[in-house]
Amino acid sequence: MEDQLFRTIMGSFATGVTVITTQVDDEIHGMTANAFMSVSLQPKLVAISIGEKAKMLGYINSSKKFAINILAANQKDLSKQFAGQLNSDEVVAFETYQGQPIIKNSLAVISCELFNQLDAGDHTVFIGRVTGLKHEPQEPLLFFGGKYQEIKE
Ligand code: FAD
């Protein structure tokens, strides 16, 4: 099987875009991720998948909690920032929710404590138990075919 075909097919599954945030000691860390899914309603569980090279892997292993910030259409630059694709020194505005750092003005925030984790090839799947939900309805940022997209009427 070809790696490129696998990437192309996975990239043809349209998703939203999130930034995973967590805090270790006094430092706030963020990482862009679209490998996010809802897992269970009772109890409320969600999953994210983090690559073995990402620093976020070690941060979540330390903090045992994280927040998933679902980005709005006007937050594309934040997605790039937390994917390491912007050479910007711009200070990101965080606020605190359920004792966790979150990104201001996101479409939604899901705060979680670590429920379980699974090593899966070159990624680790973290399952989070939901501890809080915050929603500010607005248009979502989308990712499809390796590009950012927005909903078109
Ligand atoms: P770093 O490289 O340290 O951080 C990433 C960037 O965030 C850096 O530029 C850093 O300056 C910035 N940053 C971190 N904390 C702060 C802060 N407090 N204030 C301001 N800036 C800060 N990878 C996955 O493993 N799983 C996925 O599901 C996934 N989905 C992705 C989806 C999209 C649309 C994109 C574009 C990338 C995705 N990636 C995913 C790749 C991932 O975002 C990058 O590999 C990322 O750079 C890894 O970050 P890191 O944890 O190694 O941390």
Image: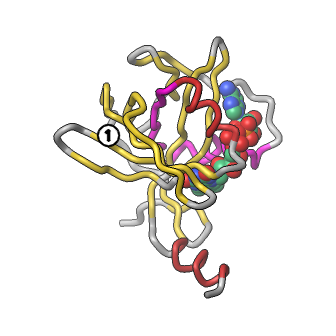
Q: Is residue 89 left or right of residue 20?
A: right
Q: Which residue is at 61% across, 68% downward?
A: 146
In the image, is residue 17 above or below residue 20?
A: below
Provide the secondary structure element on which disc 1 rests.
Answer: loop
Please give the name of the residue rendered at 52% of the width and 21% of the height, measured from the top-left corner: 101
Badge 1 density bin: few <14, some 14–19, many ≥20, Cα 10 Å: few
Q: Is residue 56 left or right of residue 98?
A: right
Q: How is the image coloured?
A: secondary structure
Residue shown at the point (63%, 58%) measured from the top left: 122
Find disc 1 in the rendering and name its residue.
137
Looking at the rendering, which quadrant does residue 68 occupy? top left
Q: Quadrant of residue 42?
A: top left
Residue 72, horizontal then vertical, whole percent:
46, 44
Residue 99, x across and y down, in percent: 44, 14
For badge 1, the amino acid type reads Pro
Look at the numbered disc 1 and say if its residue's Cβ is closer than 8 Å to ligand 1. Answer: no
**Residue 33 rendering spot, x and y as whole percentages:** 55, 49
**Residue 28 location in percent, x, y?**
63, 22
Decide: is 71 above or below 104: below
Quadrant for ligand 1 reads: top right
Of the 4 image quadrants, the one containing the N terminus is bottom right
Quadrant assignment for the C terminus? bottom left
The residue at the point 80 percent across, 36 percent down is 88
Decide: is 94 above or below 53: above
Frontmost residue, 98 versus 85? 98
* Observer-nearest of 27 and 59: 59
Res 81 quadrant in image: top right
Pick the front one: 108 or 62: 62
Is residue 109 in sight in this rendering? yes
Magenta span of residues: 64-86
Tell me if residue 77 is in the magenta stretch.
Answer: yes
Is residue 72 visible in this depiction of the protein?
Answer: no
